[in-house]
Image (cartoon, rainbow, N blue to C red):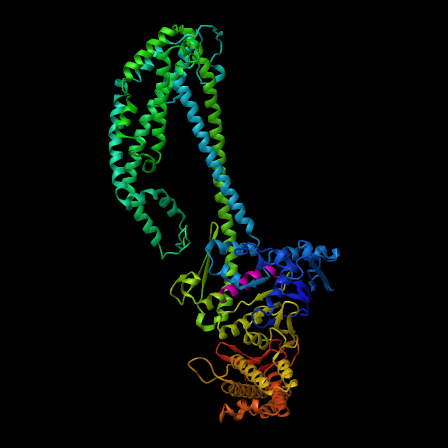
Amino acid sequence: MKIHSLSIKNIRGIPHLKIEPSLKSLVIYGPNGSGKSAVIDSIDFLLTGRIARLIGEGTDGVSLKSHGPHIDKNTDLSKVEVSAEIKIASVSELITISRKMSQASKLVYDKKYDLQLAPIIELLDRGQHVFTRKELLKLITAKASTRASEIQKILKLGDLESIRKNLGSVFNESKKEYKAALLSLEASKEEVLAISGHATYEVSEILEFVNQQRKILGANPLTDLITSDLQKDIAPIQTNVKSVNHEQLTERVIALKKPELSTLFAEAINHDMELRTTLKNIREDPQANWDSTRHQFTVEGISLIRESGECPLCDIAWKDNELTEYLEKRVETQKERQENLIQHAVSISKNASAIILKISQLEELISSVKDTERAKSSKIFIENETALSEWKRKLIDLSSALVKPLENYDDEQFKSVDIKTLYSPIQVDSNLVKFEAEVKKLFPEATPEQGAWDDLTKLKERIKLVEIGEQEVTKKSTILNRATVLGQAYVNARDTVLDSLYDKIKHRFVSFYREMHGPDENDFEASFTPKEAALNLEVDFYGRGQHPPHAMHSEGHQDSMGVCLFLALSEHLNKGLIDLTILDDIVMSVDTGHRRAFCDVIANNFPDRQFIITTHDTMWANQLKSAGIVPGKQMLKFSNWSVDDGPDVHYEADMWGRIQKDLDNDDVPAAAAKLRRGMEEFSRYVCHSLKAPVPYTIDDAGTLGDFLPSAIGRYSDLLKAAIKSAESWDKTEIAKELKQIDSQRISIVNRTNAEQWNVNKAVHFNEWANMQRDDFVQVVEAFKDLYEKVFSCSNPSCQSVLQVTFNGATKTGVRCKCGDTNWNLLKM
């Protein structure tokens, strides 16, 4: 797709403007604030329904409908419109497309072109056709994650990261659900243990307990622990009398007395003393306290360090493996303290859990009678039942605090003396004896059959929950395993595809950059390393290793990298569909020499692409013309912008048109200044293209008097060499044509008088400003002929400066871009 004509109405700073690129490249140049970028915004709006400049970071409070239209038309969006005639390869005629701000999402065109335009519109929607300095920073100096998202957005790979994030969310949610299922299962097992009286959940022990109850009830033993079989072949036993198994009551009371808890008590006190000592040492050392607080964060951070050495938190790159080594040293320093913390905290918590289970078992035994009137009317029952619940709650609080002891286990909330009472409350034995006696007095002893039946009834419900919990854990485990495998498989597949894609783009990027920087960067290399949501870019620095672009390279080199990377991406994406690239003021810090080389990159690699380029640099605009990228008539100069009228547009904005305008105004000094400056820049480019030797200056400056004679001399030498080559091959007609060209050259050069400048380089062109208009007109005509008929191709569609071609170090010919001029320099 290319643009033939463009009509802009009331967009940004342009009330009305029509431009006709005629499917060719176009340069819009002029000072900052002259309206150049408004043209880019208009094309952007036409092709995407958006204006990239008005969206993204730093655009809060800015909107398309409020700030996209011309300021005088933002209330009548129906009058804000951009239209264009475009040409696509699959359709012979021009297609008209248009878009209004009142319906920004709707691109209007003849629906008979739906099939042909669909893939083009899909590509345009990515907005990759417009490249500005803002995008330069996103591609080169941005964080790795930002660079990845920008490149993936250009290539419409944004879904890749969305899918990865979704899979990551699925994994995290699966892991969370799996842990929840495990906790639920453990809670169900503890309820079974509260009935059976066991310390740990072993199926064989629970089955043995079940069979003991079945034996009491005269039933055969079971071989498997299946809930539906627990009361199989047993007649129900019903009674209205609330009773308690006195034998089990005694056993469970004894289990909570000091003699039974003495071992747990001693272990807990020892671990508590060690834990408090470790915590005290850490808390009194500010650095140790800080390192311990962030210990887990540090451990997890090490696993997230990128291969390039970038910190996962701030994206700052460390050399080699320094960040990993630094953090591992910190972890190693804390290793002993952390192990002590974990060891003692876990041991205390484990002992607390053992007591909690014993209390739960006693509570379970009396659960069926505690809401009876007898229990409620007994002060002894109520006080001791409440004391048991409070004891259990404090132990649970203790266990919760020990999960993060450094943050939660302090002397204020958990005093040493209080910990002792948690493991063995004061008067616990006497209180338990009173409680046991009170329960036995209030409630008759349950018959063995009644107790067995009640236990099996409760176990049937609780073991069913265990079975459901085990099924849920198995299910959640399967989901977690699949999420893990799927996530890793996706990342591996994505990285394989991206590696291949980035490798292709990298080769073109390196090729463009080498061509742009010449022999100085012949060994330049680059690496693209995708990792999770990031894309690390490192480039060679003169054989001293690869580094991030902004670590070693100048701003100008970074800019040229951005341009080369964008061209590589654009080439990959648009080949065969969109032959349009828009560059909006993207060579601000690229030096003059490399701007000329950038022209060559465009000319050599994208001869059929339409470029629309804006710049405030007149010199680069002329370089684009001299390189044959943009015909003279496609040079538009913007100036004198105003709110009401927009920019003044000079449609014949090449050097000769502007000089003629000065002459029409009888302003010879202004015309002379333009001629000198224009010819000086043009002569520089000719010397570059013909490889003409020029006088060296330490500041790489020079004047027209330095460049033009060298260019003329070099041209003369090459033309004579071409004549001798033709004669050596008996190409008499070609030799005759070349001699005619030489005669024309001599005549034109004599009219410029330039060959005499070696006597006094400054005198001639310094005196131009003092000439009369008619005299200076002859000077202008002579130099225009030199410009157009000597150094440039005469084909109006080419007009490129002639260039020397080489085979290695051997000069082989002189030719223009289109090939109409093609001199052979090799002799037979």
On screen, 548 above or below 614? above
Asked whether the viewer can see residue 226, the reply is: no
On screen, 386 above or below 26? above
Instruction: Tell me where residue 601 appears, x and y as whole percent.
Output: 54, 70
Instruction: Tell me where residue 422 appears, x and y as whole percent.
Output: 30, 24
Give yes or no for residue 84 being in the magenta stretch: no
Residue 750, located in which quarter of the rendered image?
bottom right
Instruction: Tell me where residue 241 appears, x and y as whole percent.
Output: 44, 5
Instruction: Tell me where residue 114 appears, x and y as whole percent.
Output: 72, 55
Residue sitting nearer the eye, 357 or 286: 286
Asked whether the viewer can see residue 683, the reply is: yes
The residue shown at (27%, 25%) is 420
In the rendered structure, the answer to whether residue 560 lies left or right of residue 671 reads: left
Q: Quadrant of the C terminus?
A: bottom right
Q: Magenta segment, which residues?
A: 560-575
The residue shown at (45%, 70%) is 522
In the rendered structure, the answer to whether residue 271 lies left or right of residue 751 reads: left
The residue shown at (49%, 65%) is 561
Residue sitting nearer the eye, 110 or 118: 110
